[in-house]
Image: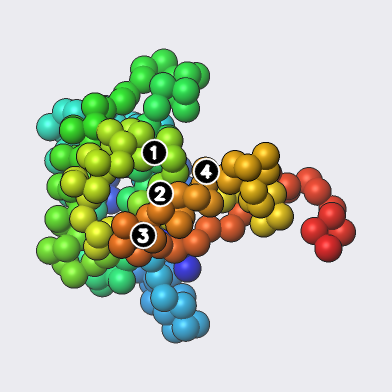
């Protein structure tokens, strides 16, 4: 089970991020134990992308020491809370102007700074023997400065998941051009990155199931 945490729990290192309904740590630990007794492997998901970090409230301004320190403290706490899980998903999608156009303040790092920041958290994962896991797409690749910078800056022990929102048949080659999401999966494999496939009904939540037969 992939558990997206955000403000869902009360962090010991930053209790000020809790909102009404956030689960106290002791109660959450009991829930983790209950799920493990049911046979589930549990993977925490945090999202440190500035397009998805409203849960961090005033700490969520990237490029500041306050932000860096908060990310590191929260990540360490979560890894220990989950007893060093196999993976931690760190998010890191949609760091672009387009995905933040409705925000009052837009946060976007230059590629060099983005690589520096994500590697700081990757190193914490490695310190605990945990595999770092992030989102990927052709647009995300651009935010790392493109192929050369990404491959130089991101080690091949980082697990990637490319976005895939369409039905399988829609990824077929059309007009001699393949869908970039599917092409990227093949490319990342050739570069040596481990990948976890994604499937989604997000685009089709209102489509009758007969449409998929």
Calculate the distance from the C-alpha at mark 2 to the C-alpha at mark 3.
18 Å
Residue 109 circle label: none
Q: Are marks 2 and 1 in contact (CB under 8 Å)?
A: yes
Q: Residue at x 36, y 20 (%)?
A: 106
> Sequence order check: which comes first, mark 1 or mark 3?
1
- How far from the left and from the top, in percent, is residue 202? 65, 47
> Sequence order check: which comes first, mark 2 or mark 1?
2
The one nearer the camera, 62 or 133, is: 133
Q: Residue furthest top?
A: 104
Which quadrant of the figure has residue 32? bottom left
Circle 1 crowding by C-alpha within 10 Å: few under 14, some 14–19, many from 20: some
Calculate the distance from the C-alpha at mark 3 to the C-alpha at mark 4.
15 Å
- Quarter of the image with the C terminus is bottom right
Q: Are marks 1 and 3 in contact (CB under 8 Å)?
A: no
Q: Secondary structure at mark 3?
A: helix
Q: Which residue is mark 1?
A: 140
The one nearer the camera, 29 or 147, is: 147
Q: Which residue is mark 4?
A: 180
Calculate the distance from the C-alpha at mark 2 to the C-alpha at mark 1.
8 Å
Q: Which residue is mark 3?
A: 190
Circle 3 crowding by C-alpha within 10 Å: few under 14, some 14–19, many from 20: few
Q: Which residue is mark 2?
A: 135
Q: How is the image coloured?
A: rainbow
């Amino acid at each position: 089970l992939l558990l997206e945490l955000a403000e869902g729990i009360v962090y010991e290192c930053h209790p000020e991020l809790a909102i009404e309904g956030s689960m106290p740590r002791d109660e959450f630990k009991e829930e983790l134990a209950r799920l493990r007794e049911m046979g589930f492997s549990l993977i925490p998901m945090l999202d440190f992308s500035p397009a998805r970090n409203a849960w961090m409230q005033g700490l969520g301004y990237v490029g500041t020491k306050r932000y860096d320190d908060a990310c590191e403290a929260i990540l360490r706490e979560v890894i220990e809370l989950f007893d060093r899980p196999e993976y931690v998903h760190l998010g890191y999608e949609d760091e672009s102007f387009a995905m933040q156009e409705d925000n009052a303040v837009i946060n976007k790092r230059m590629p060099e700074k983005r690589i520096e920041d994500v590697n700081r958290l990757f190193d914490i994962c490695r310190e605990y023997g945990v595999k770092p896991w992030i989102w990927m797409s052709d647009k995300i690749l651009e935010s790392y400065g493109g192929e050369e910078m990404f491959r130089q800056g991101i080690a091949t022990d980082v697990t990637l998941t490319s976005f895939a929102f369409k039905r399988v048949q829609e990824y077929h080659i059309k007009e001699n051009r393949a869908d970039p999401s599917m092409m990227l999966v093949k490319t990342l494999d050739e570069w040596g990155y481990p990948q976890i496939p994604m499937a989604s009904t997000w685009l089709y939540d209102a489509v009758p199931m007969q449409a998929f037969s």
